[in-house]
Amino acid sequence: MARLWAFFSDTRGATSIEYAMIGAGISILCIVGAGNIGTALKTKFIGPISGGLN
């Protein structure tokens, strides 16, 4: 029981896990933002250009 309690009370790796979660969150936001910008640019520029060529 003492080993189990020592395992759950150990906080040495908590900071690195928190930084990894922050990094993962930022990268997800960047990917989603880039996708939304790409979709908006495609709608704004490619749509009218391809419509004008038909």
Image (cartoon, rainbow, N blue to C red):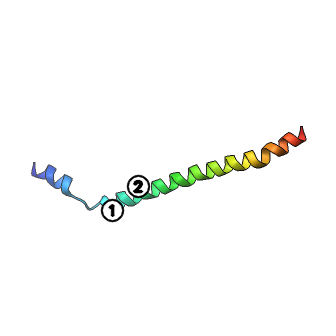
The residue sitting at 51% across, 51% down in the picture is 28
- Which image quadrant is residue 9 in? bottom left
Q: Which residue is mark 2?
A: 21
The residue sitting at 21% across, 58% down in the picture is 10
Relative depth, front residue between 12 and 44 = 44
For the residue carrying disc 2, how many other residues have a C-alpha within 10 Å: few (<14), some (14-19), or many (20+)?
A: few
What is the number of the mark on residue 28?
Answer: none
Tell me the kind of residue under disc 2: Met
Q: Secondary structure at mark 1?
A: helix
Give coordinates of residue 32: x percent, y percent. Answer: 57, 49
Determine whether, in the image, residue 45 is placed left or right of residue 54. left
Q: Which residue is mark 1?
A: 15
For the residue carrying disc 1, how many other residues have a C-alpha within 10 Å: few (<14), some (14-19), or many (20+)?
A: few
Tell me the kind of residue under disc 1: Thr
Determine whether, in the image, residue 21 is placed left or right of residue 7. right
- Which image quadrant is residue 19 in? bottom left
Rendered-image quadrant of the C terminus = top right
Determine whether, in the image, residue 5 is placed left or right of residue 46. left
In the rendered image, the residue lying farthest to the top is: 54
Asked whether the beta carbons under mark 1 and mark 2 sit within 8 Å of each other, the answer is: no
The residue sitting at 20% across, 52% down in the picture is 8
Give coordinates of residue 5: x percent, y percent. Answer: 14, 52
The residue sitting at 84% across, 42% down in the picture is 50
Dot placed on the residue nearer the N-terminal end, 1 or 2: 1
Q: Secondary structure at mark 2?
A: helix
Relative depth, front residue between 22 and 51 = 51
